[in-house]
């Protein structure tokens, strides 16, 4: 046995142990874990947090993603088509858990205060009817909401506590199966969203690599500030030289990606037509976030209509000396108006996000002409209940803080492709890939046994192939490389190349030409062929780095890692073992 444990074999064993440590397999881990909770979800009020394991939903045991999806589907979430008649025309769309707009009204009128993009409604439109039913005032509107958005009892038990509440739609949480190793799964395997974005420069201005790097830096900061995990942002380029940015966010929805990535996020504070400051560290060296002493929802929330609540958030920012000087220059010539609430300047501080007015703040009279460095930013949140309005205010505050901290994107972005992938499909693919891989290895082993008729030679081929696979996965776990479908194809290609190289070694050792009378010459000839094939394949992988806007990068990386591990570690060990086996014969 000792003669088989040569230095090359010991190197293989050491790298295998290191790979197992990097992968850290945990096959005993079971269940469904919560990987994200939307801040606007009422479940956050009850203390639900990421990392909790779901045990039951409405009495149904939850052990797999299929169990979770079946339990959610039982909540009667079929979309309903509604038609809203306004003084500006009719608008039709589908709803599940929200009506899509907030109104303010009395006994005779209903006016839109805020509306989501998918509705087509705009602020200040008058609501006249929904689904043909005339709405005279708030009472009719509330009754119609109760009819359209029937709430279902939702009871979820986790390993920490039980959550019971009424929901009109699916709980706004993201889940995944408990991690069984340190291997990072790509979107195809765990679910999430992938966006392929095309930066748009000004007409006549060339798009440079520095522009792309700056864009990625701001995007990364924006997504990190927002609190999303498992984010991959990289530059990409097609074969024609067109530049793109690829963003992958595990567990995120299409709406989240569209909201955070597609919008440029240009924040401007204006007094009249003059811009006083813009979002970003240039004008704003400090934005309070996550500190209750200088940010939060200002009590009390108020009921603006039956079934309609409003809450106000506020947080502190600091202006740079230049921005403070600009504020002083703009306000010094304004007049002072006296009101019952106090004395204010004749113009307000208007807050715009992507050209849309978000809020207007009164400027106290004693701030006229002063170089103000500290400002309180505020804004509203709306909901059908006080709790919902509070959560909406928190979500709006977080989004605005994120934009102010990260600043606007240096370039406008066009969404070329936006994919959302179900984690259920990923689980099926993993199972099929493992089964297919095992059958392929057994098939290769059988063919090699038939060719050489020696079990002692066949077994090392199988062990070497598995070793290459384990070490490639260990390297991927070590660098946190996301394994997607392309990467798995690369693994298969690398293992296939490894088997081919092992056959070359065996042929040279068993059937070497007579002029190669010693083992050293035979091994040298075999590795000459192997290194030639390795360099050819490595060069062939380089164009795939940018092919398909970088979507085939996983194939190129895993193939290169796999064949490099084979050439440097497993092939020498395999040659050493086979040399001793054949010599023994």
Image (cartoon, rainbow, N blue to C red):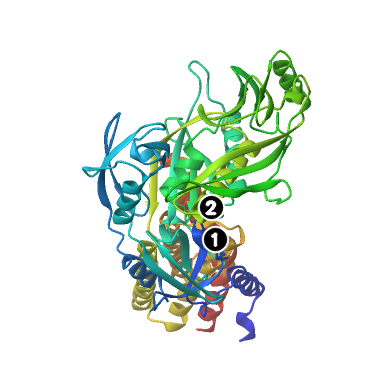
Q: Are marks 2 and 1 in contact (CB under 8 Å)?
A: yes
**Apparent side of residue 236 relative to residue 453 in the rendered image (left or right):** right
At x 51%, y 49%, the residue is 392
Q: Provide the residue designation for mark 1.
A: 44
Of the numbered discs 2 and 1, the one sitting upstream in the chain is 1
The crowd level at tag 2 (other Cα within 10 Å; few <14, some 14-19, many 20+) is: many
Can the viewer see residue 528 in this picture? Answer: no
- Residue 583 seen in this snapshot: yes
Give the SS element for disc 1.
helix
Circle 2 residue: 391
On screen, residue 446 above or below 317: below
Picture coordinates of residue 203, whole percent (x, y): 48, 17
Residue 148 lies left or right of residue 372; in this view the side is: left
Q: For the residue labelled by badge 2, is the local secondary structure a helix, a strand or a loop?
A: helix
Residue 378 drawn at (x, y percent): 62, 38
Q: Which mark is residue 459?
A: none
Query: For this view, does 52 lie left or right of residue 198?
Result: right
Judge whether 288 appears above or below 4 on screen.
above
């Amino acid at each position: 046995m000792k003669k088989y444990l040569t230095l090359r074999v010991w190197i293989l064993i050491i790298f295998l142990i290191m790979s197992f440590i990097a992968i850290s397999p945990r096959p005993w881990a079971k269940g469904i874990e919560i990987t994200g909770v939307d801040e606007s979800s009422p479940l956050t009020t009850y203390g639900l947090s990421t990392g909790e394991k779901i045990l039951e939903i409405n009495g149904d045991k939850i052990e797999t993603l299929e169990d979770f999806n079946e339990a959610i589907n039982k909540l009667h979430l079929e979309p309903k088509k509604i038609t809203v008649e306004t003084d500006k025309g009719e608008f039709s769309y589908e709803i599940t858990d929200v009506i899509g707009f907030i109104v303010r009204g009395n006994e005779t009128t209903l006016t839109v205060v805020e509306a989501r993009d998918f509705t087509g409604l705009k602020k200040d439109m008058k609501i006249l009817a929904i689904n043909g039913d005339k709405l005279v005032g708030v009472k009719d509107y509330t009754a119609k909401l109760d009819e359209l958005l029937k709430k279902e009892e939702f009871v979820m038990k986790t390993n920490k506590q039980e959550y019971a509440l009424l929901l009109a739609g699916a709980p706004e949480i993201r889940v995944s199966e408990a991690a069984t190793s340190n291997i990072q799964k790509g979107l195809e395997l765990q679910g999430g969203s992938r966006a392929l974005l095309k930066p748009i420069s000004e007409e006549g201005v060339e798009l440079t690599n520095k522009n792309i790097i700056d864009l990625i830096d701001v995007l990364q900061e924006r997504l990190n500030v927002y609190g999303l995990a498992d984010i991959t942002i990289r530059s990409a380029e097609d074969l024609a030289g067109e530049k793109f940015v690829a963003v992958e966010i595990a567990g995120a929805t299409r709406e989240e990606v569209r909201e955070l990535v597609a919008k440029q996020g240009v924040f401007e504070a204006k007094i009249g037509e003059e811009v006083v400051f813009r979002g970003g560290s240039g004008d704003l060296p400090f934005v309070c976030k996550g500190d209750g002493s200088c940010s939060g929802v200002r009590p009390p929330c108020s009921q603006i209509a039956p079934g309609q609540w409003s809450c106000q958030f506020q947080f502190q920012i600091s202006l740079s000396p230049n921005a403070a000087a600009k504020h002083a220059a703009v306000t010094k010539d304004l007049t002072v108006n006296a009101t019952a609430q106090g004395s204010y300047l004749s113009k307000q501080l208007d807050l715009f996000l992507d050209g849309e007015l978000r809020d207007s703040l009164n400027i106290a009279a004693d701030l006229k002409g002063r170089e103000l460095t500290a400002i309180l930013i505020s804004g509203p949140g709306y909901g059908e209940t006080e709790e919902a309005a509070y959560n909406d205010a928190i979500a709006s505050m977080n989004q605005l803080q994120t934009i102010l901290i990260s600043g606007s994107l240096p370039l406008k972005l066009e969404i070329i492709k936006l994919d959302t992938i179900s984690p259920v499909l990923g689980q099926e693919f993993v199972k099929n890939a493992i089964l297919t891989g095992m059958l392929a290895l057994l098939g290769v082993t059988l063919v090699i046994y038939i060719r050489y008729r020696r079990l002692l030679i066949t077994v090392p081929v199988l062990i070497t192939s598995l070793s290459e696979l384990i070490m490639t996965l260990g390297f991927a776990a070590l660098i946190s490389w996301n394994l997607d479908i392309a990467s798995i194809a690369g693994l298969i290609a690398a293992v296939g190349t490894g088997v081919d190289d092992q056959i070359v070694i065996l042929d040279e050792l068993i059937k070497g030409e007579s002029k190669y009378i010693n083992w050293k010459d035979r091994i040298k000839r075999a590795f000459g062929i192997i290194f030639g094939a390795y360099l050819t394949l490595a060069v062939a992988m380089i164009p795939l780095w940018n092919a398909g806007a970088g979507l085939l990068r996983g194939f190129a990386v895993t193939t290169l890692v796999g064949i490099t591990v084979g050439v440097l570690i497993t092939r020498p060990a395999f040659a050493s073992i086979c040399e001793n086996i054949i010599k023994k014969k």
